[in-house]
Amino acid sequence: MYKKRRLFSVGDLNVDILQGLASKPVFGEERRLQELAISIGGNAANFAVIGSKLGLKPFLISVIGKDFATRFLKEQLSEAGVKTSLIKSQKQNTFAIILVNKRGERSIQSMKDCYQDVDSKKFGKLLLPKLKRGDFVFFGGFYHFKNLRPSFRGLLAKAKKRGATICFDTCFDSFGKWDINSFLPFIDYLFVNDLELRHIAHGSTMRKRVESLFKKGARIVAVKQEAKGATLFVKGLKPKHFPSVAGRVVDTTGAGDAFNAGFVFGLMRGWSLENCAIAGNFVAAKKIRVHGLAAPAIKAVERFVARNGKAG
């Protein structure tokens, strides 16, 4: 059944410039870098690349700028086996400068020039004609596109009308808007980390924050908690925590995207939500052991879930 379903990833595509810090940076001084790496980045692009490694054959819909990085991004997507439909912008590509300390923690500074040329109607023209009943659509990097918001509810409504399952990852809102209440009822699976949740919803505890989202229309919320793992909330049921299965931490960049890909890997196989969360944790654990967008072998995911999950 899952092989007949298709997966679309819609949202951000950028260049990540990762700097592994040997010591704390001090303005006015020059310090040695432990490592420097340049790779593809963005919530939607990372999800698509890892999803491709998991055999999901995702189709990425995004925007690409015009500069020295354009060829690099296209080559990276091609090498990962990700099919694309990219809006062409005359502006500079998006770049993210990522500082990673010895504990694997990160800080991100970014510029988003070419994202200014995209709105929901442009994404809709590329996505909606391709959608069929049973398809999955993952939206990543919504907050990075300040022009998506005005018509985004309408785009989700049209995708739902075509029978698509909607997955949405919040990411961090550098513009400070945060509100997603107007289109929450159209989201089937909401992915958010605990820091983002504090901005999006009110409440003194994680559970109360998620319950406030349920009141606005959310139904299933997966809260990613870094080293603590993840907690799955389903409206009307008790939340369930899934401890991290990670060992050594090298770089947490893209870990949330890896969790999303692992979770959707399970959804597209018809697995229980519990097994989807277990798969998400396992794929994320593989990612954080290295720099770059690593993913476990498909058989490894299946074996891990078979040993640690429940039937169904």
Image (tube, helix red, strand yellow):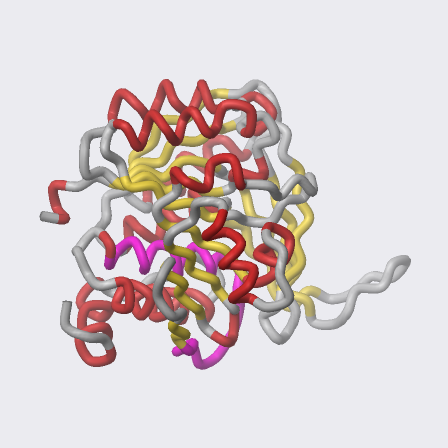
Give above or below for 138 relative to 253. above
Q: Is residue 226 left or right of residue 157?
A: right
Question: Please, is residue 42 above or below residue 94 in the view?
Answer: below
Task: Give me the residue at 49% from left, 38% from top.
Answer: 12
Question: Do we see residue 273 in this rendering?
Answer: yes
Q: Residue furthest left?
A: 1
Q: Nearer the viewer, residue 34 or 93?
A: 93
- Evaluate whether residue 82 shows in this view: no
Tell me where residue 134 appears, x and y as whole percent: 19, 39
Left or right of 134 in this view: 159: right
Residue 244 inside the magenta-drawn segment: yes
- The answer to whether residue 218 is left or right of residue 8 is right
Judge whether 163 appears above or below 19 on screen: above
Asked if the stretch drawn in magenta spans residue 48, the answer is no
**Where is residue 155 shown, x and y percent of the image?**
41, 26
Q: Considering depth in this image, is 130 or 16 the residue closer to the camera?
A: 130
For the magenta stretch, what is the residue range? 243-266
> Where is residue 204, by image quadrant?
bottom right
| Residue 32 picture quarter | bottom right
Q: Residue at (30%, 36%) from the top-left corner? A: 59
Q: Position of residue 121 (x, y in %)?
A: 45, 19
